[in-house]
Amino acid sequence: MNNLEKTTSKKLPVSILALLVLEFIFGTLAGLYQEIPDGVARFEVYKPAGIIFFHVLIATALLVLATLFVIRSKRVSKKVFGASIGGLSCIVSALVSGVLFVQTGNDIFSFTMMLFGVGGLLSYAQIVFQKQL
C-alpha cells in the first residue's frame, strides 16, 4: 500500500467517527427538544428544518460512508475489514431501531438505537486509534 492509500484510508474512518459524534449530539437534542406526534402524522417528523431531519440526514450519510469504507478496507487488512463490517452492521441496526422508534413510539427502540450507535462509535474508534492502518 502506498502513502496515498494510507492517508485516504485514514480520512474516511475519521470522518465517520466525527459524524457519529455529531449524530449523538443531534439525537440527544432531538430527544430533549423535539416531540414525535402520535397517530397518522408521524411522517411529519421527517419534514425539513427539524432536529430529527438533520439526525436522519447524518444517519444516511453514515450509511453511505460506512458502506464505502467496508469496500475500501478489504484492501487494508483483515482486522480493519472486520471492524468496518462491525461498524456498518451497528449503523444499519441503529438506523432500523430509529425507524421502529418513530413508527411505534416504543422507548426500547430509542435505547437500542443508542446502544448500536455506541457499538459503531467503538468500532470506528478502534480503527482510527490503532497503531497501523
Image (cartoon, helix red, strand yellow):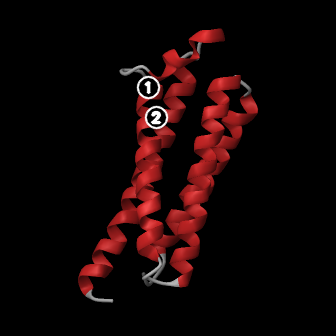
Say if mark 2 contacts mark 1, CB within 8 Å. Answer: yes
Q: Is residue 90 above or below residue 59?
A: below
Q: Is residue 125 above or below residue 78?
A: above
- Tell me if I can see residue 128 in this picture: no
Alpha-carbon span between mark 2 and mark 1: 6 Å
The residue pinned by badge 2 equals 55
Graded by Cα atoms within 10 Å as few (under 14), some (14 to 19) or many (20 or more), the crowding at tag 2 reads many
Rendering coords of residue 10 (x, y %): 36, 72
Which of the 4 image quadrants contains residue 106? top right
- Tell me if I can see residue 129 in this picture: yes
- Residue at horizontal 50 percent and vertical 15 percent from the top: 44
Three-letter code, disc 1: Ile
- Residue at horizontal 61 percent and vertical 64 percent from the top: 86
Circle 2 SS class:
helix
- Residue at horizontal 46 percent and vertical 34 percent from the top: 55
Residue 93 falls left or right of residue 56: right
The residue pinned by badge 1 equals 51
Circle 1 SS class:
helix
- Residue at horizontal 71 percent and vertical 35 percent from the top: 109
- Nearer to us in this view, 51 or 68: 68
Q: Quadrant of the C terminus?
A: bottom left
Rendering coords of residue 91 (x, y %): 56, 51
Three-letter code, disc 2: His
Q: Is residue 31 above or below residue 85?
A: above
